Structures are given as C-alpha cells and as structure tokens.
Image (cartoon, rainbow, N blue to C red):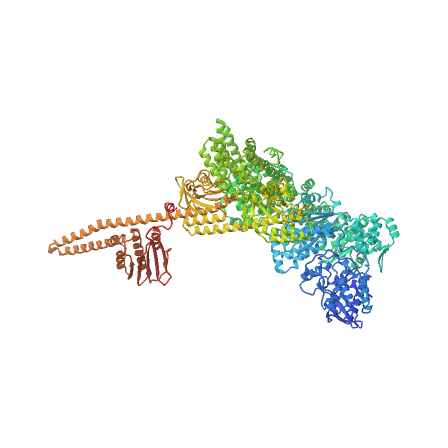
C-alpha cells in the first residue's frame, strides 16, 4: 500500500500480487463500489491511470492497531459509536466486511474511524466456510467469530462482523483482544469454548453498559448476539448521551434483524444431536463406525450433521464433507472425491514431521495404486510428492479406487486425531462412492473414523441402488440410524420465535395462521416467512416484527405455497436470473472461475449479477482454496431447473459447453454440458473436438470407476463419430463395452461386442474387447463359449493352439519347458529377461490369463496344462510380462493333475511368486500367491495356507481383481476348517466371504461358501437336517470343483457324526470328481475320509469284498504316506489314523493300539481340532469294542470335550445320548452360547440411572473405585464401601463364579480367592440365593429371606430373625461372572426395585472390571510362569545337575500352580517309580521308590505315555508306600526323553480341582526336565566313553612297555653281551674285525638306551613302581629346559589319576620345549582330600590355545575323562599357566542313572 498523487490530491494505492491478483482486485473494487457514500468507509477513487490497483481516499490518519491502549473512556465511546455507525452503513448496502480488526480501522486526524481492506468482503448473504486447517483460516484469528473458523455448524453472515467489532472494542477498552494472541489452535478453541473476562473487570473505568454491549457482541451463538449494527449503534449512542448515574434500559432492546435467517441453533433436534455426539464418542472406542441420517428434503439433515463440527474440533479432530449432485455424476460432484480433496488440503497445512509420517502411511497403504490416487487427486499428488505414476488397469479402477479411498482414510484417522467424514445426499451416489461407503460400514473398522451419511428417504425405493446396502447397513450393530421427521407444532413455534425474536405466544399465533399450509418442514417454514417478509406481509419495526393476521391469512390462503417458495428466482432481474439458471445447470455448487467461464462475463459483471441472488438468500458463498457459490438448498436449484423452459435450457447448455470447451482444464465440465445437447453439434470440426472432449472425460471417469458416466459419455461420442472412422469407432465401442461389463449390463455388452467384431479386421484390434468378453462369459458360467472365443482369438494371433484331441499329448510334451525352467535355470536368469513389448505377445498373454478360469472350472485339465505351459514358453523364449505370471502359476496344478508331481509344482509356484515380488508385478503376483496358497497344503502347515491366502486377498483387492480375491476363500476356508481353534473362528471367515460375495456377486464362490456355512450349522446343531442331507452336494452346482468341495465337506460332517453310509456315499462321489482338483486340499480330505469309510466297511465286510476294500484302502494309504512325508503337520496323524483303522479292521489289536496312540500323539502336536477329536473318539470306541471300558470311556470323554471346545455341539449331544455318563466324566466345560462381541445387557451403555443424587454420586464413586483395582479382593472391598453407603446394606459380598471349577469363589484379604465348596465355607454364603440367581440370570429383591419359602431352609438363614437381600447377577457377554449380594439384617424390605437401576449400572461396570482383573491375573500368571521357565531353562543351559533342576522345577511348579504337592518321578524297568524331586510333601521324599497305585494319574501316565488327570476325595494314606498323596485333584504329565517315557511330573491339590489348562501348562515344565535328563545322560555317556578310551590307551601303553622291556630290550642286551664275548675271543690278527665289533656293541648299547627311553615314554616303569612324585622328578631331569618342581604328595594316588597327571605334565613340558621359547618352567603338584591340583608354568612367549593343534586338546579330553578340568591362561608375551584339577574320588561331574538312583 502506497500513497501517490492523482489529479492533484494524495490517494492510497493498493496493489495486489499473486496468480489471481486481478480477480481479487475486481472483487474489492466491486465491494467498494457498493459502499460509495457510506460514512466511515474509505471511499473508492477513480484512477484510470492506475489500472490493476485499488485506489482509495487518504484519510490522513493512523491505524487503530498503532494507538496506545486502553483508550480513555470518552475517546473509547466516541470511537465505538463511529465504528458502529460505519458497520451499520456498510450492512445497509448489503456488504459484510468479514475481517474487522484494529489493523483494518484507520482513525483520521479529527478522530473519525474508517473501515479499510475489503479483500475478504462479500455480499450480504450467508457464507458457509469449509473445515480448514487452523493455520489456513482466513482472517486474523484473534478477532474472528466462532463460525468463521469452520468449526461450527453455523453459516457466516453479517453477525460475524459484529463479533469482530466486539473483539476490536474489547481491545480498545482493555489493551488486548478477548483471548490474546498466540497458538492458533488454542485461539480457535477459545473462540469456541471460552467466555472472555468482561472488560469492566479488567478496566474498572469502563462503564458497565459498555462492558455489557461488548460481551453481547462476543456471544458464541450468532442468534444470541446483536442481530444488527443498528442495534449496537442505538445502545452506544444511548450510553454516550445518558448522564452519569441515570438509569438505562437493557442492551439489545432496539435490535431488530434486517432479514429472517434460520436460527443458528437447531430447533427440536436435541435428541438427534445427542445421538450424533454419542456416536462420535463411541467411534473413538470402536463402538460405532457410521450414522445414517434419513428424512424428507428440507427437514434439516445437513444442518443436523453440521452440529458435529464443534464436537469434533473440541476432540482435536477433523471434519470433512462432500455432497453428491442430482444431475451431475462427474468427478467434481463425487462426494468421496470432495472428501479426499478436503483432507489433502488439511494435510498440506500440517507440520512437516507430521506430514512425513502421514505420507509414509498413505504410500504404504496404497502401494502400487499411488498412480491411480494421484491421477484423480492432484492435491494428494503434491502431498505424496509423486510426479507421475501408472494408474493401472482401467477395468479394475473402480474396485481399486474404492480401496485406496478407504486406505487413505485409514492412514489419516486415529483416535488421537479423529476424523468425521460427512457424505451428503447419498441417494445420488454412483456405484464407486457407494462401494466406498459400503467398505467403511461393512469391513474392518478404522480407528478414529466416523462416517455420517445423509439421504432422502422418499427417493430410495426398492429398485434404487442404495436400497440393498441401506437395509444391510441398518442391521449392522455399529451403524446408527437417525430418521428426521418434520417438526411438530410446538417446535415450529420455537423455530418462528427464534427467527423473529418474539415471545412464544406471539409466534404461536403466526404458526397457527401458516401451519395449515405447511407440514412442519423447517426449510418450507423459513422460506415462507421470507416470502412474507419480501412481499411486506410481515414487516420489521423499531419494536420488532409485526404482521396483520387477516392480511396474512388472505395472502397465504390465496396462493400456492410451492409457488411462493419459487418466487425468489422469478423475482430476480434478467442478468441475475440467467446467472442462477446457468448455475443450476452446472451443479449445486460451482466455483466462481468455472461460472465466469461458462457465462462469459468478467469478474465484475459476475459479482454484480450474483449480488441480488446473494441478497435474497438463494445462494451462499463458499470461501476456500477456490471460492465457490452454492444454492442454499437443493430445492432452490430444483425449482430453478423446473422453471427453465426446455428449449432455453438446451440453448443455455450448448452455449456454456462451447465456452467451457475453450478452457482446457474444464474439459469435464464442458463434456457434462454437451451431453444433453450433443445432437445439436453439426459442424464437422466441432464434432471431432467434442468427441475428443467426451473421450477425455470418459478416461477421467474410468479412473474412479464411474462406468455409468463412461457409458453416457461414450454413447454420446458414438453419435458424433463418422461411419468411415473405423479406428475411432472400435476404440470408443471397446471403451463402452468395458463400461457395460463393469456395470453388469452383460447382455448389452454382448451386443456391443458383436458390433466390435464386425468392425475389426484382425484379432489384435479387438483383443482388449475379447478379454473383457471372456470374463463376461466366465462370470455367467458360460465356460464353453468363453473357451471357444478365446482360443479362436489366440489362433488368429498366430498361437498354434492344438485341436481338442491333440491337447493331452501336446500338453504332456510341453512339461519339458517346466522341468527345464525349474531344474536348469536360476532365479537370476528370470530377472535378466527383457520385458515383452510385442503387442501380439502381450495380447496373447492377456487372452490366456482371461480364459484360464473357464478352463479350470470346466474342468479341462489338458487345456489348463497347455495354456499355462504356453505362457511359460512365451516367458522363456521372448521375455517377461506381468500378464504371464498368473497363467504360469497354473503349471503347478497341471503337473500335479497330469503327472502327480507335487514337488515340482510347489517349487515352480514358489519361484513364480518370488519372481513376481522381485519384478513388482501386481496384482499378478498376488494371483500367483493365491494359487500358491491352494497348493501349499501339500508342503506347509494349514496356518501358512491361511496366511498366504489372506495376503493374496489383500493384494488382489488392492489391485482391483475382485474375482480372484473372492477365489482366495477356496484356500482359507478349507484350511481354517482344519486348523481353526473353534468353529466360531472358521465361521467368521465364511461369513466374511459371503458378505464379500454379496457385494461382488460371485455366484460360484458364494455357492461354495454356503456349503461351508452349512457344515458349521449342522455341527453346531443349528440345522435339524440329517448329516449329508443338509449339504446339497448333488444340486445344480455350476462346476465339478464346487461339487468336490461339497462332497468333501459332506464327508467331514458324516465322519464326525458317525454316519458310515453317508460317509461312504459322499466320499465315493468325491473320488469320482478328483479330476476337478487333484492339487487342492479337498482332494486330500476326500481320500482320507474315503479311507475311513473303507475301513469301516471292511470291519463289517466278509471274504473277497473285504479284501477289495482293504486293497483300495492300501492305495489311499500309499498316497497319504507320500503327502505325510512332505507335510507331516497336515497328514502324518491322518496316516497313523488310517493305519489304526486298518489294523482294527483286520483284528490286529496291538498294531491298532500303537497306531491310535501314534495318531493321537502326532495330532496333539498341531492344532487340528476335529482330527484330534475324531481320532480320540475312534480310539475310545475301539477300546470299548475290545472290553477296555475304563480307557474307552476316558477317551470318549476326552473326545467329547474336544468336540465341545471346537463348538460341535450337535456331536456333543449325540455322544451324551449314546453315553450319558460322559457328561459327568468330561468335566465342567460348557460352550459359550453367546458371541464374544454381543453387548452385555447389563453394560453401562444399556443402564438407565433413575435414582437421585446419592445414587449418582455412588455410581461415580464406584466407577472411580472399579477403574483403579486390578484384583478381585480389591474390587470387593471398594464395592462394599460404595454400595453400603449407597443402599444402606449392612453387608456386601462379591461371589465370583468359576466355570472351570464349577464353584463359587470368595475373595480373601491376601488378594486371592477360595472356593466355597469342599472347604467348610458352604454355610458362609446363601447358596440357594446364588443358585436361583444363576439359573434365572435376573436380579432378585427379597424383603425377608427368613420367611421366603424359596430360601428359608437355607442353613445360612438358620439363626437369623430377618434378612433383606438384593442379588444382582454380574454378566459379561451374557455369561455369568459373579453375583453381588447385598443384605440388611436390621430392616425388612430394605431394598426396592427402584434401586435396581443404579446397582445394575455398577454391576455392568463391575463386569468389565472383573474381566480386567482376570486378564491382569492371567498376565501376571503368564509373566510369573515365563520367568520361572526362564530360570529353569537357564539351569538346564548351564548343565546344572539334574537333582538341582528337579528341586527347582518341583518348587517353582508347586508355587505357580498353587499346588499342595509336586512330585517328579522316574519310571523304573520293574514298574516302580523313584521320586527325584518334590515340593510340599512329607512323604514320599526324594529317593523313595515304590509302585504308583492303579487308576491314579501317575499310573495312567506310566501305562499310556500321555498326560492324565484324576479327581477324587481321597484321604492321606497311612502307608507312604501306597504312593497316594492324599490329594483331591491330581494332574500328571509325561517326561519324554529320546522318544521314551522316562518318568512323569505330578501336581496335586488337596481342596479344589486343578484348572482345565493344567496339562498344557505342565507340559512346558516337563519338556525342561526332559532336556535336563537328556543332557545328563549325554554327558554321562560321553564321560564314560572318554574314560574307556583313556583306560584302553593306558593299558595298551603298559602292554607295549612290558613287551618292549621283556622282549626286544632283553634280546638287545643279550646281543650286546654276546658281541662283547665274541670280541674278547678274537685273535690279535683280527684287530680290524675287533673295530667293527666295537661299533656293533656300541650300536647295540645305544639301541638299548633308546629303547629304554621309548619304553619310559610309553609308560615309565618308575611311575608304576614309585608313583607320581619320582616319575615327575625323572621327567624334569630329562627336560631340555630347567624345571622347578614343587610336589606335595605323601601317599600314592589312584592309578588313573597318576597316569593322567604324568602325561599331562609330560605333554606340557614337551610343548614348552618345542614352542614356548621359555628359559625356565615350573611344575606344582598338591592334593587335598578330593582333588589333585597340578600347575605347569613357563616364562615363554604365550599365545597357547586349545583350538590350535591336537596336543592341548588331548590333554583337555584326558582330564575330562576323569571328570576333571583344565584351564589355560596364556596371554601373548607373558608366559603360560596350565591349571589342572583331577578328582580323587568320583570322576564324573554328572551322575549316571545308577548314581541318580542311589542318590534318590
């Protein structure tokens, strides 16, 4: 801003910068033009010489912000009057400033204030700001009204200026704005939620009335504020003119609004607003994911949802919204697109560190779809810093765009920063955004996200696309539904009263006059009142609004109300009306730049035309990144279009389309305008231009899957394409064909494809359409047509497809490609392959990929094989392409089906998946991963199959491949049926699959999943159908693969339910269908169950029939043996099971017993519930058949429990009917009949507090108390205090029900619990009350239990004269957890039903706290258990002695399990057991040996090798040899060492039953004991072996020494003597010969000496004769290095010790002489009572190491052989110390088994 001289006077020139500077200049000039002559506004100066600037008069003053504050009172009031007068004048001209601050007020030299800076000013109409980041809010935040922040539901009108005026006056009076300056987020919150301190309290000089005026201006709600600046001016002038001390009237007395606006507060919607707020709160904890708001137009749906804005802001969240359009379906009017765009703008304003985190999350979530996301959301492209990326396959764009929208929301929303997404007018949504809404409301919930959708109820009839999803969403437990009705008369009165600011009595009279013509619709009421105001029927006076009843009745009664509501548009002047009509054609909301381009007006002309519409309230401004204008209500737009003549509308749209087509970036808007008038385009050049425009718009619509728009745009384009332009016709029709297919209009797509075929001259031109048509035919199960079409296209492309009769042979030959690729090439070779660019090959790849599903489902194995191997051939010979990955994956199934080669198929698939991951081919890699999941069960555990299948599903969904994503359930559902811990987990997957199928319409997969759901239904007893009959395997299933699954599942049901006939029938049918899927797991199920059926038949068969059955069974078992070798976790136990069944069939009792045992043991190692249960059941039946009733019933009871845990209640009932005793023998396990996620009927959310303040305080106190306690005793103590005070109870008891123990538990002071039953505490609680409450599940109020016939006989009440009782069941997920028992023994009838609600509410809170307490206790138990296991594992790892491990395990297990006794016993060969460790017992102690009593847990383990449990009420036996521990409940677990039962560990309780999971937990300890024993045995064996080797070597040395001494040495000595004798007898003449004899004698003597040295080295005789001391002295004398000896030995030592010590010293001295370069050495030897200590030291170079050479290592082995040890200390340059310790008694640090027995 600068001062310049114009026409001889100084003016102020304002220049605006930026890309839209000219528009902003024009806008401000238009606003100032309206304000010419208004006092207090800086006037516009005409300055033609300064274009592009805003030139205003120079008032020659100072900015108000620069003045010293606070002002003096007189100056303050005078300035306030001037400002109010300026604002009033501005508002009278229909302009609101929107940015009144001290910085925008200039005070002239004579003290007159002037408003400046009208950059944000707008016409006098409501402005609805979007929710923007707090850093992007327009204006100076310290002075902005709450509604200007975008955080409220309020539109911005002239009353926002009054708030700014109030904030400015506040600063003038106090020195600062109401909430100061500083953090924008805190300022925003303060404007919304804080009340400023009144100015008079800060500055006492300020008059009270002035302070009241300012506070009235600063009201949060616009309706509670001053309504007009005239009212403010009146009060300030009155203040100025009133003498001090004179009485003044209240503020706002003369404040009458200039126009009628809807109340800022919603009238009559308090309950709905509360429901919305509750939904938002629940969304933060996962309790709510969406709200549906329905109602008629004008009922206030949008206004209601806007009430969430301040709530979300208060929670630190974001509110983003989008609105669909009735007439526009392009991207700009896609509400989801608008939501993502608004979200991107919010994110772009975030700090960089937060933006980086969000960016990383979004990129990770959308993965390869980032190209599609950024193509349709430019703001997100900037946010994600992605310049360009491939948007991917257009055919899958719809699904992918839905998924990425959800993933973006998931990446942004969190409980820390919640996100509310509002989608308005859902009834006009297309399929893509509807899919997004469906995903958000149906699939996995997003933390911190609440979706709110509004729709018009009357527009959604049964055929409507929204009807089906809406019905489904309404049934979802996490989706709330609000239905808004028109207002009743009372609320209409309140609405009118608030609009007119009159009392309710006056408003009631007006409503009585108009209500006969209205239905209570809020919009219609507001519009009618404004029509009455506009026509002068209702008028504003100084005293308020006034009307004449007779005139009003005549006016309304003589008019059509609907016409009255439409008169607003008709009353506009020509230019404004045409502008509104143009806007109605463009959309419900239009950016100003688009509107300007469409009508061909300048910005100034546009603003001038808009002003009347804004003044009348027909449209409102939407400021934002791109300013827009929208209709205030959809009905205004509808009435505008309805009143527009069709011919004029066509002309208007054609003119706008042509103007918009000239702006390249507005191509989509231009295309929408061309659509209805395309027939009017006749010029050839324009026709071509419009075709390009329509195709470009269609391409954009494809990106978001808006195929309805694509079809409309391309259909219009076809009408403009000339018949000679074949290429364009093919391209356009191919696009339309794909759109029709994607819309599900498959018959229309067939017609379009036939047209394309007629236009195409070769297969390549129509390849894309052929691929789509193949998918279409396959989708309708027209497999033969799909195959014929695709093979024909391949042949036309030059692919030599063999004839049908040649396919098997050709396919078989082509397996060479597979084996060559798998066996002779490396993965690196694949990565080196080039990408295929040849169009024919790429088309062939797509066609092969398209036709394979049809071939697979037919099924045509040779065709599948040939096609997949052809894809592999193309890959090997020409290069890589993502489209080849899926077809190549089918080679795995081909090689399994045709050659039975599972391993090569598995290897090929693993390599294909790895290759796809390395190349980044998606979703092709996910398709390969899905096929891999189908095949993985042959080599990997089922758990891996589930994981692979789900990962593949995620990738396929991200890639938009819904068909294959649905097919992944073929892998995960059968696998979960095998390995899921319960049917509930399995059914969850099935239901998820069915929900997916309902959304995608995949009939085949849906039929298969229905079959699997029926399996659960029959097994759970939910279906009354007979097994097999409930499974329509012989129905009109569309493929043999589906039939294979059906018969396989039917076989499972019949096998479990014991229906041999049904099993035989299903498995025979399934075996005949194996051709459909040799490579899928149901083929294995079919074979295994077939084997089971054959064994059952063989048991009942005879002769030849039996032999044939057994032969077929053997074939099955041979096949299964091969599978078990590859995947033992899946098949080994089943193989053993069939072996047992076969042995049973042929009468081999011993083989059957062993096989059943092996099968059970193998099944116990993996989670295969029904396998384990079925094996156990058959084993039990086998034992019963052979007269072993105890074992048989035990096994059947175990099977029953396993079926029950799995959830097969129908099977449990069947067993109970057949074997009634099982129910009692099986324990106390009962199925939970309620789903885990079902809300508790007694939860806090369902309770209603109806008592007074005491109850409320009690509830709050209880809530605080319960939330702070983590154990049951603490909960009991706190509850007793609270409930006693709250209800007057003299006693409060908390009785916890233990389902495991089937007893009630009492809290104890030491934070534990004790059982009531069996502990002498039965009379301390009223058991009859507890049983009654448990059975009914309802609260119980008893006035006096002592006189109540139901309970009076209870021993608890025997000595009582009165007892009032209140019993409240504490339920969690409909399961009884505890009972709260309140009693009063002083007053009868102390408790009433009226008090139930409060106590029930506390009970609901208690249920959660009990769950938390149990969870905390479980965590604590697991932590203690893991700590104990680590402690014991450390002992084992350190090779501690077994007796130490035994003692530690017994002690730790006893403590952790709360056992009264723990025993670790070893089983002896004579069937005795030896106690190795114990805890808590006086008898028997470690070392005791005896026979376990029959029937007890220890004996059962000894007999079966499996864990066992016994529960009895024994008394401690007098005879300890009976091995009876006197325990009520015992559990024993086997200790398995080297596949043999070494012993067992037993824990027992004397007063209560041990928990059901004791066996599992105990197994962790027995594994550690087994490891310790195995280690000890290994060390013993190693030590013994070493000792034997050393002893043998020593004996050999002695023998050699004796042989040398007695043999060779003696003969050499004799020879020397003989030579001496011969020398003495020689005559003198032979002296020369004498010399030779001298040399011979000397040589013989030397040989004797050398042999003596050798003999001494082998085994020195002196060692044997004199012992270690003289032997070492002799050794030292012979050493070449001086040796200092220090030997302190007085007696002879054991021979082995002396020999080892001697040789260790000898080897050490030899090493010193050879390697140490030492000058001296020393040897120290001394012995104590148990150990011989030897130290050898030298002063050499050091650096010796056991790992270098074998000498030192040999010494170490020699010492270890005696149980000794050697330590070596040899730093470089500092000599070497060798310390040796050799035991003189036992020579092994680890006891042998015999030694253990002796110690025991």
Q: Nearer the viewer, residue 1064 or 849?
A: 1064
Q: Nearer the viewer, residue 688 or 622?
A: 622
Query: Is 1608 on the left-hand or right-hand side of 784?
Result: left
Q: Choose top left, top right, bottom left or bottom right for residue 100.
A: bottom right
Query: Is 1269 on the left-hand or right-hand side of 145?
Result: left
Query: Is 263 on the left-hand or right-hand side of 1149?
Result: right
* Percent position of residue 1237, x then y: 62, 45
* Percent position of residue 1270, x then y: 57, 52
Report the label total. Answer: 0
- Is the residue 1047 above or below the residue 1357 in the image? above
Q: Nearer the viewer, residue 389 or 1602?
A: 1602
Q: Quadrant of the N terminus?
A: bottom right
Q: Nearer the viewer, residue 1536 or 857?
A: 1536
- Is the residue 788 above or below the residue 1769 in the image? above
Residue 879 visible at all = no
* Percent position of residue 781, x then y: 63, 38
Query: Is 1333 on the left-hand or right-hand side of 1769?
Result: right
Residue 1552 visible at all = yes
* Percent position of residue 274, x then y: 71, 51
């Amino acid at each position: 801003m600068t001062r310049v001289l114009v026409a001889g006077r100084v003016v102020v020139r304002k220049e605006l910068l930026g890309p839209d500077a000219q528009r902003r200049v024009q806008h401000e000039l238009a606003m100032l033009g309206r304000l010419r002559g208004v006092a207090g506004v800086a006037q516009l100066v005409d300055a033609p010489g300064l274009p592009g600037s805003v030139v205003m008069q120079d008032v020659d003053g100072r900015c108000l912000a620069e003045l010293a504050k606070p002002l003096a009172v007189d100056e303050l009031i005078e300035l306030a009057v001037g400002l109010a007068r300026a604002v009033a004048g501005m508002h009278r001209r229909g302009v609101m400033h929107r940015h009144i601050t001290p910085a925008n007020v200039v005070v002239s030299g004579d003290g007159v204030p002037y408003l400046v800076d009208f950059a944000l000013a707008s016409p006098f109409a409501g402005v609805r700001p979007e929710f923007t980041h707090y850093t992007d809010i327009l204006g100076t935040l310290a002075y902005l009204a709450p509604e200007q922040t975008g955080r409220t539901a309020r539109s911005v009108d002239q009353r926002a200026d009054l708030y700014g005026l109030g904030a400015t006056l506040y600063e003038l009076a106090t020195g600062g704005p109401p909430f100061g300056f500083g953090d924008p987020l805190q300022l925003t919150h303060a404007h919304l939620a804080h009340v400023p301190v009144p100015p008079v309290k800060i500055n006492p000089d300020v008059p009270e009335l002035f302070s009241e005026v300012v506070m009235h201006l600063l009201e949060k709600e616009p309706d509670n504020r001053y309504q007009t600046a005239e009212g403010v001016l009146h009060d300030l002038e009155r203040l100025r003119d009133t003498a001090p001390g004179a009485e003044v009237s209240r503020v706002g007395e003369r404040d009458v609004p200039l126009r009628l606006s809807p109340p800022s507060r919603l009238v009559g919607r308090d309950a709905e607003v509360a429901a919305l707020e509750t939904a938002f709160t629940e969304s933060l904890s996962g309790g709510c994911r969406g709200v549906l708001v329905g109602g008629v137009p004008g009922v206030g749906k949008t206004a209601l949802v806007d009430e969430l804005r301040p709530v979300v802001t208060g929670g630190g969240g974001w509110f983003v919204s989008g609105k669909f359009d009735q007439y526009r379906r392009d991207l700009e009017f896609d509400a989801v697109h608008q939501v993502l765009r608004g979200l991107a703008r919010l994110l772009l304003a975030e700090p960089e560190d937060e933006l980086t985190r969000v960016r990383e999350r979004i990129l990770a979530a959308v993965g390869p779809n980032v190209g599609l996301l950024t193509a349709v959301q430019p703001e997100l492209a900037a946010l994600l810093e992605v310049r360009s990326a491939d948007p991917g396959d257009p055919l899958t764009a719809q699904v992918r765009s839905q998924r990425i929208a959800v993933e973006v929301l998931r990446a942004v929303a969190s409980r820390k920063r919640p996100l509310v997404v509002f989608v308005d007018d859902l009834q006009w949504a297309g399929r893509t955004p509807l899919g997004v809404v469906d995903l958000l409301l149906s699939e996995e919930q997003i933390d911190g996200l609440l979706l709110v959708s509004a729709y018009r109820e009357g527009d959604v009839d049964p055929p409507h696309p929204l009807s089906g999803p809406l019905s489904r969403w309404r049934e979802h437990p996490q989706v709330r539904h609000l239905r808004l009705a028109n207002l009743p008369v009372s609320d209409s009165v309140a609405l009118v009263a608030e609009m007119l600011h009159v009392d309710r009595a006056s408003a009631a009279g007006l409503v009585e006059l108009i209500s006969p013509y209205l239905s209570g619709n809020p919009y219609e009421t507001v519009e009618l009142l404004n029509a009455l105001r506009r026509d002068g029927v209702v008028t504003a006076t100084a005293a308020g609004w006034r009307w004449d009843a007779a005139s009003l009745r005549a006016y309304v009664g003589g008019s059509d109300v609907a016409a009255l509501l439409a008169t607003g548009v008709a009353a506009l002047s020509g230019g404004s009306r045409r502008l509104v009509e143009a806007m109605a054609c463009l959309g419900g909301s239009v950016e100003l730049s688009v509107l300007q381009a469409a009508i061909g007006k300048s910005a100034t002309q546009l603003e001038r035309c808009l002003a009347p519409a804004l003044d009348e309230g027909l449209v409102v401004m939407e400021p934002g990144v791109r300013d827009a204008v929208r209709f205030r209500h959809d009905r205004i737009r509808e009435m505008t279009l309805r009143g527009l003549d069709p011919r004029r509308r066509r002309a208007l749209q054609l003119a706008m389309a042509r103007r918009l087509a000239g702006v390249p970036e507005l191509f989509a808007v231009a295309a929408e305008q061309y659509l209805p008038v395309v027939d009017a385009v006749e010029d050839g050049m324009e026709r071509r231009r419009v075709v390009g425009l329509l195709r470009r718009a269609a391409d954009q619509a494809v990106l978001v899957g808006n195929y309805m728009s694509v079809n409309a745009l391309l259909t219009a384009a076809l009408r403009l394409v000339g018949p000679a332009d074949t290429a364009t016709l093919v391209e356009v029709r191919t696009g339309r064909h794909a759109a029709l297919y994607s819309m599900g209009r498959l018959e229309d797509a067939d017609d379009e494809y036939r047209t394309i075929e007629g236009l195409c001259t070769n297969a390549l031109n129509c390849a894309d359409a052929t691929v789509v048509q193949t998918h279409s035919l396959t989708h309708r199960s027209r497999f033969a047509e799909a195959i014929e079409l695709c093979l024909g296209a391949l042949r036309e492309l030059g692919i030599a497809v063999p004839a049908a009769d040649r396919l098997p042979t050709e396919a078989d030959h082509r397996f060479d490609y597979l084996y060559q690729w798998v066996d002779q090439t490396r993965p690196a070779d694949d990565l080196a392959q080039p990408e295929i660019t040849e169009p024919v090959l790429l088309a062939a790849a797509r066609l092969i990929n398209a036709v394979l599903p049809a071939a697979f489902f037919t099924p045509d194995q040779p065709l599948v094989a040939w096609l997949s191997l052809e894809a592999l051939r193309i890959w090997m010979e020409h290069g890589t392409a993502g489209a080849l990955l899926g077809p190549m994956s089918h080679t795995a199934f081909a090689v399994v089906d045709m050659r039975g080669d599972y391993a090569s198929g598995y290897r090929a698939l693993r390599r294909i998946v790895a290759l796809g991951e390395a190349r980044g081919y998606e979703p092709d890699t996910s398709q390969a991963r899905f096929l891999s999941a189908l095949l993985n069960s042959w080599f990997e555990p089922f758990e891996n199959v589930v994981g692979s299948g789900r990962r593949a599903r995620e990738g396929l969904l991200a890639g938009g491949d819904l068909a294959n994503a649905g097919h992944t359930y073929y892998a995960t559902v059968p696998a979960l049926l095998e390995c899921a811990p319960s049917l509930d987990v399995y059914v969850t997957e099935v239901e998820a699959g069915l929900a997916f199928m309902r959304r995608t319409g995949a009939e085949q997969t849906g039929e298969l999943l229905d079959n699997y759901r029926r399996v659960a239904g029959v097994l759970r007893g939910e279906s009354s159908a007979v097994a097999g009959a409930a499974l329509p395997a012989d129905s009109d299933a569309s493929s043999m693969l589906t039939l294979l699954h059906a018969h396989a599942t039917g076989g499972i049901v019949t096998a479990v339910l014991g229906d041999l006939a049904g099993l035989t029938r299903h498995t025979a049918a399934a075996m005949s269908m194996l051709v459909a899927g040799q490579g899928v797991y149901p083929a294995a199920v079919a074979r295994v169950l077939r084997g089971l059926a054959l064994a059952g038949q063989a048991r009942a068969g005879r002769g030849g029939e039996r032999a044939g059955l057994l032969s077929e069974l053997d074939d099955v078992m041979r096949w299964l043996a091969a599978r078990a070798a590859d995947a033992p976790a899946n098949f080994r136990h089943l193989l053993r099971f069939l072996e047992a069944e076969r042995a049973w069939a042929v009468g081999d009792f011993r083989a059957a017993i062993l096989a059943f045992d092996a099968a059970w043991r193998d099944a116990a190692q993996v989670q295969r519930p029904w396998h384990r249960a079925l094996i156990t059941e058959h084993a039990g039946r086998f034992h019963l058949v052979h007269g072993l009733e105890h074992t048989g019933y035990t096994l059947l009871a175990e099977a029953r429990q396993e079926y029950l845990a799995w959830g097969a209640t129908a099977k449990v009932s069947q067993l109970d009917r057949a074997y009634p005793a099982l129910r009692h023998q099986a324990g106390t396990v009962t199925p939970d009949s309620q789903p885990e996620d079902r809300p508790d009927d007694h939860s806090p959310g369902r309770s209603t507090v109806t008592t007074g303040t005491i109850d409320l305080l009690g509830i709050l106190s209880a809530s605080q108390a319960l939330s702070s306690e983590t154990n049951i005793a603490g909960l009991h103590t706190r509850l007793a205090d609270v409930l006693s005070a709250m209800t007057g109870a003299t006693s409060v008891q908390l009785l916890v029900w233990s389902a495991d123990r089937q007893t009630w538990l009492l809290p104890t002071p030491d934070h534990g619990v004790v059982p009531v039953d069996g502990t002498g505490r039965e009379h301390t609680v009223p058991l009859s009350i507890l049983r009654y409450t448990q059975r009914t599940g309802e609260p119980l109020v008893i006035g006096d239990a002592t006189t109540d016939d139901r309970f009076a006989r209870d021993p608890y009440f025997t000595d009582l004269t009165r007892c009032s009782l209140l019993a409240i069941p504490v339920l969690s997920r409909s399961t009884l957890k505890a009972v709260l028992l309140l009693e009063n023994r002083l007053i009868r009838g102390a408790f009433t039903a009226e008090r139930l609600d409060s106590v029930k509410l506390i009970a609901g809170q208690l249920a959660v706290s009990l769950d938390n307490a149990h969870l905390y206790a479980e965590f604590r138990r697991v932590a203690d258990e893991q700590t104990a296991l680590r402690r014991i594992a450390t002992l084992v790892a350190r090779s501690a002695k077994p007796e130490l491990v035994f003692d530690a395990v017994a002690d730790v297990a006893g403590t952790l399990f709360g056992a009264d006794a723990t025993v670790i016993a070893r089983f002896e060969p004579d069937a005795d057991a030896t106690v190795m460790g114990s805890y808590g017992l006086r008898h028997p102690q470690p070392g005791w040996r005896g026979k376990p009593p029959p029937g007890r847990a220890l004996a059962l383990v000894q007999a079966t090798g499996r864990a066992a449990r016994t529960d009895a009420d024994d008394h401690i036996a007098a005879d300890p040899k009976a091995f009876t521990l006197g325990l009520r409940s015992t559990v024993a677990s086997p200790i398995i060492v080297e596949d043999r039962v070494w012993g067992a560990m037993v824990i027992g309780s004397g007063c209560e039953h041990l928990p059901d999971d004791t066996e599992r937990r105990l197994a962790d300890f027995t594994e550690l004991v087994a490891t310790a024993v195995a280690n000890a045995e290994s060390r013993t064996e190693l030590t013994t072996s070493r000792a034997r080797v050393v002893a043998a070597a020593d004996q050999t040395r002695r023998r050699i020494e004796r042989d040398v001494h007695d043999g060779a040495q003696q003969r050499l000595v004799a020879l020397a003597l003989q030579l001496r004798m011969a020398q003495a007898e020689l005559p003198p003449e032979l002296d020369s010969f004498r010399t030779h004899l001298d040399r011979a004698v000397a040589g013989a003597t030397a040989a004797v000496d050398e042999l003596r040295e050798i003999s001494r080295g082998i085994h020195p005789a002196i060692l044997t004769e004199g012992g270690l001391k003289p032997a070492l002295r002799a050794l030292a004398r012979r050493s070449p290095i001086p040796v200092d000896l220090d030997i302190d030995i007085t007696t002879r030592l054991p021979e082995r010790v002396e020999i080892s010590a001697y040789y260790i010293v000898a080897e050490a001295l030899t090493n010193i002489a050879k390697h140490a370069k030492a000058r001296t050495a020393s040897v120290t030897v001394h012995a104590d009572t148990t150990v011989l200590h030897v130290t050898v030291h030298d002063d050499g170079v050091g650096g010796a190491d056991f790992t270098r050479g074998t000498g030192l290592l040999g010494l170490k082995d020699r010492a270890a052989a005696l149980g000794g040890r050697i330590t070596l200390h040899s730093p470089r340059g500092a000599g070497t110390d060798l310390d040796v310790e050799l035991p003189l008694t036992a020579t092994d640090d680890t006891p042998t088994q015999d030694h253990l027995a002796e110690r025991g």
